Image (cartoon, rainbow, N blue to C red):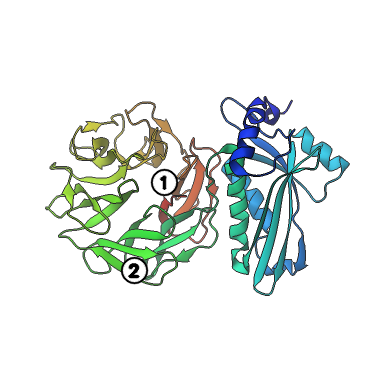
Amino acid sequence: MSSFTTASKLFRFLLPCLMAMSGIAFAADVVITSEQKGTEVIALGYIEFPCVKGDPKASSSPPGTVLVDDLHFSGRFNVRFATTFDTSTKTLFKQDGALAYLRGSYTLEKDRYTLDCELVDIDSGTTIIKKHYEGPKEQLRLAAHQFADELVYQLFGEKGIAQTRITYVNKRSTGKEVAAMDYDGANAREIAPNKSINLTPIFLGAKDKILFTSYAAGVPQFFQADVTAAKSAKVFVSAGMNSAASYNRMDKEIAYASTADGNSEIYRRTVDGGKATRLTFSEGIDTSPSWSPNGYEIVFMSDRTGTPMLYIMDRDGSNLRRITFDFSYCGSPVWSPKGDKIAFVALDEGNNFNIYTVGPEGKDPAKLTTNSGSNESPTWSPDGRHIAFMSTRTGSPEIFVMGADGSEPRRITFSGGNSMPSWSDF
C-alpha cells in the first residue's frame, strides 16, 4: 500500500465540520487525507488545464503548472500528472493513493484572464472545491497561487504560502539594491533603487511594506518602501548606525542594532515613532536581534564573552541567558514562526558557514546545510515549514529554499549577487 494512503479516518471525522465552516459542498463519501507519523501528505491527480479561449502563449507560466509547483513546494501533496481523465488515468491516480483530482481551464483574451479550478472526487465525479478567478492578464499566476493556498487551507486548516514574497539584496555595479520576488522566485523586481548600499531588508509584517538599512544619506539609517512604489522614505534618524531590524507584528515594534550610544547595542521602538528603548549594556558587539513569535523574547548575537554566540532576553532586556556554546562563531539568528526553533549560522570545522537550528533552551542543535561554500542568512517561511537562505554553492551568491529540516534545497534566483533574504508574513 502506498505511504500516501495510510489511515484516512481523520478526514472522515472532520468532513462535516469543514462543510459547516466553509459552506463548500463536499462529496459525502470523499476521503482525501492521510496520516503518516504525524505528517499529512495528500495524493492528488492533476489533469492539464487547457486554454479554452485566446492564445496560451500570452502567458509565460500556464496556471496549472504554477498550481502543481505550488503543491509540490508545500510538501503537503503528491501530484500525478495526466492530459485527460479516463479509466486508465483513474487507475494510475488511485495506485498513488489519490482519491481526488484537479481539473480546470482558463482563458486569455486581450488584457484579461479567467481561471476555473476544481478538486473532484475520483469515484463519484462530485466537485469538492470549486473556484473562479478573473482579472488583468498579469495576475493569472497570482490566481493559481490563490487556489493552491485555498487547497492548503481547506484540506489542512492552515494558511498556505504561495502568495507570500521574499525580499533580498541584489548586488549591482552601482551598489546593492533591495529587491523582492514571489516566494518561488518569480516576478523579481528592484524596490526603490537608489544606487547606494542597502542591507538587511525585512517585511513589516505583510508582503507590501519593506524596511531596510541604507547608506543613501551617508550614515546607515532605516528607510521604508512599498513593493509597488518607486521611492523610499527615511523612517527615523538617530545618532550612529542603525541596522539589522526585526519586526514584532504583535506590537508593531522593531528590535534593531544601533551605535547611538557608541557601542553596538540592541534597541526597540515602534516603527512610526516613539522613543527608542535600549535593551543591552555590554562592552561587546550586540546585533542581529529576532523576536519570538509571541513578542515576549528576543534572540540576538553577542561577542560579550569573546566569541560571537547566541543569547535570549525578555523584551525589556531582562532574564538574559546564553543558548549556544559548542561553536567557534554563531550569528544571524531568526526565530521560527511556531517558536520551537531558532535558525542561525555557524562556522564549522571546515571554515564554512552553515545553517543550523537549535531549541530556545539551547537543546538539540541540528545542522541543515552541508554543501561547499557559504550558507548564510536564514529566514523562515511564515508557516515554519521552509527556510530561505543565501548560498555560494554554485559560485556567486544566490537564494535557495529548503525544508525546515534541510531537505530538498531549491535554487530560486539565477542572476548572481543575491543575498540577505527575508520572508514576508502571509
Which quadrant does the N terminus fall into? top right
The percent position of residue 298, horizontal first and vertical second, equals: 28, 40
Q: Earlier in the sequence, mark 1 or mark 2?
A: 2
Residue identifier under label 2: 232
> Of the residues shown, which amino acid type is indicated by label 1?
Thr
Looking at the image, can residue 328 be seen?
A: yes
Which residue does the image show at 31% across and 29% down from the upper left?
326
| Number of numbered discs visible in the structure rendering | 2
Residue 213 quadrant = bottom left
The percent position of residue 338, horizontal first and vertical second, equals: 42, 36
Residue identifier under label 1: 379
| Residue sitting nearer the eye, 66 or 25 | 25
Which residue does the image show at 70% across and 53% down from the upper left?
117
Which residue does the image show at 29% across and 52% down from the upper left?
244
Horizontally, is 401 left or right of 307 in the view? right
> Of the residues shown, which amino acid type is indicated by label 2?
Ser
Distance, label 1 to label 2, CA atoms, is 23 Å
Label 2 Cα crowd, 10 Å radius (few <14 / some 14-19 / many 20+): some
The percent position of residue 49, horizontal first and vertical second, equals: 74, 55
| Residue sitting nearer the eye, 159 or 229 | 159
Question: In terms of secondary structure, where does tag 2 sit?
Answer: strand
Question: In terms of secondary structure, where does tag 1 sit?
Answer: strand
Looking at the image, can residue 76 be seen?
A: no
Residue 42 quadrant = top right
Label 1 Cα crowd, 10 Å radius (few <14 / some 14-19 / many 20+): many
Q: Residue furthest right?
A: 87
| Residue sitting nearer the eye, 153 or 364 | 153
